[in-house]
Amino acid sequence: MPFAALGLNRDLQYALEKQFYTNPYPIQEKAIPPILNGKDVLGIAQTGSGKTASYVLPTLQLLQSKPVAKNRYVNTLVLVPTRELAIQVQKVYKAFSDRLEQGIKSLAVFGGVSINPQMMDMNGVEILVATPGRLLELVEKKAVFLTNVDVLVLDEADKMLNLGFKEEMSNIFKLLPKKRQNLLFSATLSADLSAIQSLVLQNPVTIEIEAETQNLDLIAQLAYAVQDDRKGPLLRYLISTLEMKQVLVFTSSVHRADTVTDKLNQNGFKAIAMHSKKSQGAREDALRKFKNGDVQVLVATDLMSRGIDIPFLPFVVNYELPRSPKDYIHRIGRTGRAENAGTAISLVNADESHHFGIIQKKMKRSVALIDSEAINLKGF
Ligand code: AMP
């Protein structure tokens, strides 16, 4: 689906092209239309999902049709937990608004630096991206007024609560007009967050983006064209040459998981299999050993992948491709988490290559197929 189908105007479509955003990410597909319709939105999504543009684009478009308010009466207020996020979000606003005919000024403000330059920069600002504490200081100094805020965005709301901004947030809410649009983004849901949600949101459209579809950009994807009988040696070659200290290998059957594991062990790698034919105790034991580094390779079937949650898993290998593209994304999503880069490698035989094309189409990413013929696998 192109951005145009989401209701974004020509100016923004042009700006999107210039930023090389060709297709909307899932969160954008789901969030942009209701935001343009004036609805409140609750988005459960992490950094990396494209959540920033999902509210930046429609809030810019909404602002384009509004008359310019009095100086220092901001229209769109984005609250964020950190200086880094404030800067990052404002950059996205700037990148898209710079290309609009009618100039829209945005500004990032945050604590830990002198307040004076921020007070001066506030002239003509319509979109303010702020951390809660500094915003209240600026309000106190009458550098900014919040009584004209039409749109409130809470970005990484869970992190704001974790950092102890609850009271500041409540104080800010009291300064806002009652009638306004509210957009709340958070990576997780919690009891504290529900309290904020019910305080802020009115009949929101709820959008949840599955974690595994989020961080594709953090995952380096590689694929090797390889004959079946060379898959085992190629796997061992890659583990050695890429110095994989911890790697999760997926197979499509229990039997294959066992044979791949046996071969790895015979060749001096510490590997363990985890699949449905193992007892619950044995599975937990395997996962524990893998997590604490006692075994280097965990060989698992798809059924098992949902329970595998390892914060910094650097490598995932698809010994065989899964049937559904969703499972592929789910598998490779075991790596590239929590903002750490990861590598996903697929071993693709001739029968699987057409299917691999379908997977790439579905995930809107292309992965070059490296010919492994010339790799000398002797000794692996
Ligand atoms: P975010 O989750 O908002 O931090 O965005 C993650 C990254 O994805 C940023 O580097 C964006 O520039 C990029 N991005 C967001 N949406 C798109 C899109 N539709 N096409 C290409 N890149 C995008």
Image (tube, rainbow, N blue to C red):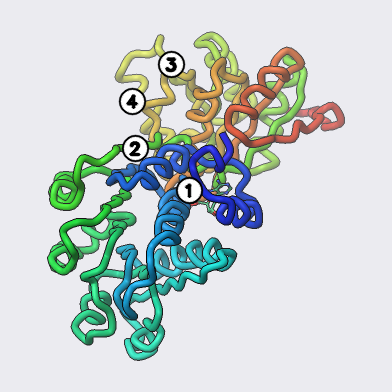
Q: Nearer the viewer, residue 278 or 10?
A: 10
Amino acid bearing label 4: Glu
Query: Is the CB atom of the residue marked by disc 1 within 8 angstroms of ligand 1's nearest atom?
Result: yes
Residue 313 visible: no
Which residue is found at the position 52% from the left and 68% from the top? 102
Tell me how far mark 2 sits from mark 3, CA to CA.
Answer: 33 Å
Q: Are marks 4 and 1 in contact (CB under 8 Å)?
A: no
Amino acid bearing label 1: Gly
Tell me how far mark 2 sits from mark 4, CA to CA.
Answer: 33 Å
Q: Report helix, strand or loop for mark 3.
A: loop
Q: Find disc 1 in the rendering and name its residue.
A: 50
Which residue is found at the position 53% from the left and 50% from the top? 9
- For marks 1 and 2 on the same chain, the one whose residue lies earlier in the sequence: 1
- For marks 4 and 1 on the same chain, the one whose residue lies earlier in the sequence: 1
Residue 103 percent coordinates (x, y): 51, 71
Residue 80 percent coordinates (x, y): 32, 63
Look at discs 2 and 4 and give the one toward the viewer.
2
Look at discs 2 and 3 and give the one toward the viewer.
2
- For marks 2 and 4 on the same chain, the one whose residue lies earlier in the sequence: 2
In the picture, residue 212 is in which quadrant?
Answer: top left
Q: Find disc 2 in the rendering and name its residue.
A: 207
Neighbour tally class for label 1: few under 14, some 14-19, many 20 plus, Cα within 10 Å = some
Residue 335 percent coordinates (x, y): 50, 39
Which residue is found at the position 19% from the left and 56% from the top? 179
Q: Find disc 3 in the rendering and name its residue.
A: 275
Disc sitting over residue 284 in the figure: 4
Amino acid bearing label 3: His
Tell me how far mark 1 sits from mark 3, CA to CA.
Answer: 34 Å
Above or below: residue 176 compared with residue 290 = below
- For marks 1 and 3 on the same chain, the one whose residue lies earlier in the sequence: 1
Neighbour tally class for label 2: few under 14, some 14-19, many 20 plus, Cα within 10 Å = some
Neighbour tally class for label 3: few under 14, some 14-19, many 20 plus, Cα within 10 Å = many
